[in-house]
Image (cartoon, rainbow, N blue to C red):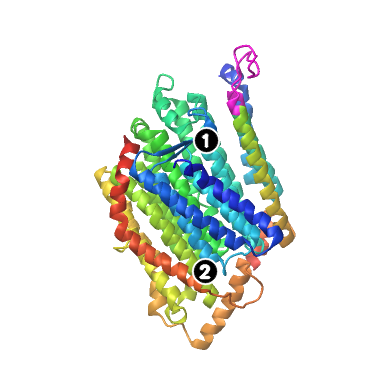
């Protein structure tokens, strides 16, 4: 049964190679192979998740070299959640990308490679192995961002590459420090050896530097303010299906890695011994929540606004990691899953609306309910879910995090978390108001502006040079509707999931 | 102070490379030079990692060699990291080719002018 663990990483890589070779024979073969691979991946992820929640973590020793010398794969409740989430989102976005997305075989090959990188990051029990998967994820993401036509996406991808590489390199440097301090790279082994480093243990400068570099590297990948600058460019420059895919998964898995590094490797005792480290985490969270929201409010383009909104939402997760108690971490996991579904769904809806009406700006959304009823309805539901209106999943995650912050008596953080609901409302409600309560100017004028805006956005986004609207398929509509339904249904089931997660988190904090 | 620096000369070299790389990434307008800066930055980290394996008077880590050994693990890890670095450079150069064919220049300011006019 634990043999499934390496297969979860190997299968997407195998599928990716298959897409490449099948492409040499038939050029249209990418999509079916990607869907088949994702379906098998989802099945395997589901099977292993049942085991991981059921008993002790599922462990697998790669190549017969036992830990701490060899690489270990460990799947507990948190990693299992990530693995299932990755499989679900990958499959969902494929349903959308059939008509909307870049359709080349190289796109699907990279797509599957990203699934492999993210899954590997989630289940590895070795810190250097995590770096390698972090870079695989990065490489696949850069290529996917550049898969749009035109110069804008290539430029965004290059900027992302430069910043992302610096982040990953800092992460590597942090691994170097941890290795110098302990002589091991295994996460479980590190957590036992770090307290005994030198004579000072957790307060040893070597250990502190290692923590600082690892966290700084992951902050770049999670896009915490002020190292978030790559994110809006990358999300706005990428094709719609790609922005949904990477916004739902890449930062999410990086946040999961942050949780692993801080709580599994350095443990809560490190945070207790170094109150400064906790202060930095809280400060990062607070600044991200506030500035992410403020920057989101000032945007005119929908996709950029959603990207800045991610900066703010991941601030909540970082805050929960800093608080580090059962409620906050349960909230962090629920919010990670919920954010992936909601933000991915919002990006897909933006693409759907752009394909059917040509509107990509906030002013362009005026009276959208009449022109694209599905787009407006789904956008409205997901936006309200994001704000945290019960029973949607956005509410449950924020509620747990807020309860955790109050339990830990981290008052400034608790206030900002509660205020974050209002801040989120600030940038979403104006769109909902425009969609439902404003007339789309005068009909003739509306058509005219829509047309010029289409032309402008088409050129800017590089989807083509003609002003014709792209097709909207049943698959696209089904995917966005599924995202909206999932956002509500997950909210109803989130409390049960929280209870399911409790033993894992208690083990993590022990 | 000088003694400490002299005994940690390797670290000094590694971290000056980090500084040079960072400066090149921020200060240069040319995209290719930015990528070169990224490579120098990574090389600084690779060197630091390799130096940690060094043992005074150590022999190569072979079965028949005499004690003490030089730790083989960092060498293996950095080999992996170098492969990653090469792939990153390849992707970056591929992107630069696309940017050049699109804008006809690799100067960041000039590209910004073109994109602002759009």
- Quarter placement of the C terminus of chain A: top left
Q: Is residue A129 left or right of residue A493?
A: right
Q: Identify the residue at horizontal 59%, vertical 23% (top origin).
A: B53
Indicate which label's residue lies in the foreground, 2 or 1.
1
Q: Work out how far the residue at label 2 is from the one at label 1, CA to CA, in angstroms.
A: 41 Å
Residue at disc 1, secondary structure = helix
- Rendering coords of residue A450 (x, y %): 54, 79
| Whole-percent x, y for residue A304 in the image | 51, 62
Which quadrant would the N terminus of chain A be assigned to in this image?
Answer: top left
Question: Where on the picture, by quarter, is residue A165?
Answer: top right
Q: Which residues are magenta?
A: B50-74
From this view, report whether residue A249 is shown above or below residue A236. above
**Are circles 2 and 1 on residues that touch, CB within 8 Å?**
no
The subunit letter for the residue under badge 2 reads A
Relative to A134, residue A447 above or below: below
Residue A203 is at least partly visible in this image: no
- With A97 as the anchor, is A248 left or right in this view? left
Mark closest to the chain's N terminus, 2 or 1: 1
Taking depth in this image into account, of A431 and A148 the one nearest to the observer is: A148
**Crowd rating for badge 2 (residues with CA inside 10 Å; few <14, some 14–19, many 20+):** many
Q: Position of residue B50 (x, y in %)?
A: 62, 27
Name the foreground residue: A357 vs A49. Answer: A49
**Total of numbered circles in the picture?**
2
Of residues B94 and A59, the one drawn nearer to the viewer in this rendering: A59
- To the question of a shared chain for discs 2 and 1, the answer is yes
From the image, tell me which residue sits under label 2. Answer: A351
Residue at 73% over, 57% down? B100
Q: Which mark is residue B99?
A: none
Residue where numbered disc 1 is placed: A62
Is residue A162 left or right of A433 when viewed as pictured? right
Reply yes or no: does residue B59 show up in magenta: yes
């Amino acid at each position: 049964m634990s043999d499934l663990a390496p297969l979860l990483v190997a299968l997407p890589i195998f599928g990716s190679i298959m897409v490449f070779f099948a492409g040499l024979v038939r050029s249209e073969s990418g999509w079916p192979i990607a869907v088949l691979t994702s379906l098998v991946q989802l099945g395997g992820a589901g099977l292993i998740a049942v085991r991981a929640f059921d008993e002790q973590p599922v462990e697998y020793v790669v190549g017969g070299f036992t830990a701490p010398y060899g690489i270990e794969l460990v799947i507990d409740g948190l990693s299992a959640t990530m693995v299932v989430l990755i499989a679900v989102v990958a499959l969902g976005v494929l349903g959308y990308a059939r008509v909307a997305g870049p359709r080349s075989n190289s796109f699907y090959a990279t797509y599957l490679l990203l699934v492999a990188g993210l899954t590997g990051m989630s289940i590895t029990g070795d810190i250097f192995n995590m770096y390698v998967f972090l870079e695989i994820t990065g490489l696949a993401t850069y290529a996917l961002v550049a898969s749009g036509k035109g110069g804008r996406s290539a430029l965004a991808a290059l900027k992302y590459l430069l910043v992302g590489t610096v982040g990953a390199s800092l992460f590597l440097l942090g691994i170097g420090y941890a290795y110098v301090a302990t002589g091991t790279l295994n996460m479980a082994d590190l957590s036992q050896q770090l307290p005994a480093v030198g004579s000072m243990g957790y307060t040893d400068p070597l250990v502190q530097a290692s923590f600082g570099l690892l966290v700084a590297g992951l902050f770049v990948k999670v896009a915490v303010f002020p190292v978030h600058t790559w994110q809006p460019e990358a999300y706005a420059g990428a094709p719609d299906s790609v922005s949904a895919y990477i916004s739902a998964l890449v930062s999410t898995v990086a946040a999961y890695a942050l949780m692993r590094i801080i709580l599994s490797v350095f443990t809560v005792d490190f945070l207790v011994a170094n109150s400064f480290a906790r202060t930095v985490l809280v400060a990062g969270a607070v600044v991200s929540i506030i500035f992410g929201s403020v920057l989101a409010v000032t945007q005119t383009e929908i996709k950029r606004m959603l990207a800045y909104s991610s900066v703010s939402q991941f601030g909540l997760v970082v805050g929960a990691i800093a608080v580090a108690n059962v409620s906050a971490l349960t909230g962090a996991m629920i919010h990670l899953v919920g954010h992936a579904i909601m933000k991915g769904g919002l990006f897909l809806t933006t693409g759907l609306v752009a394909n059917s009406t040509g509107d990509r700006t906030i002013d362009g959304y005026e009276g959208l309910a009449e022109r694209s009823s599905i787009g407006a309805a789904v956008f409205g539901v997901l936006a309200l879910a994001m704000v945290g209106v019960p029973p949607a999943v956005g509410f449950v995650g924020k509620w747990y995090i807020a309860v955790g912050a109050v339990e830990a008596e981290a008052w400034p953080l608790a206030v900002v978390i509660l205020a974050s609901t209002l801040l989120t409302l600030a940038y979403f409600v104006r769109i909902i108001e425009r969609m439902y309560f404003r007339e789309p100017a005068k009909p003739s004028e509306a058509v005219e502006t829509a047309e010029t805006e289409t032309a402008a956005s088409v050129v800017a986004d590089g989807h083509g040079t003609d002003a014709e609207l792209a097709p909207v398929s049943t698959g696209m509509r089904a995917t966005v509707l599924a995202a909206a339904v999932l956002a509500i249904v997950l909210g109803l089931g989130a409390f049960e999931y929280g209870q399911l997660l409790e033993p894992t988190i208690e083990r993590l904090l022990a | 102070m000088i003694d400490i620096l002299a005994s940690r000369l390797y670290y000094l070299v590694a971290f000056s490379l980090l500084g040079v790389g960072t400066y090149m990434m921020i200060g240069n307008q040319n995209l290719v030079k930015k990528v070169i800066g990224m490579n120098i930055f990574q090389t600084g980290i690779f060197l630091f990692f390799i130096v940690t394996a060094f043992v005074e008077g150590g022999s190569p880590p072979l079965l028949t060699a005499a004690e003490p050994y030089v730790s083989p693990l960092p060498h293996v890890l950095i080999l992996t990291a170098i492969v990653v670095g090469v792939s990153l450079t390849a992707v970056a150069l591929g992107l630069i080719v696309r940017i050049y064919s699109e804008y006809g220049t690799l100067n960041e300011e000039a590209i910004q002018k073109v994109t602002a006019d759009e």
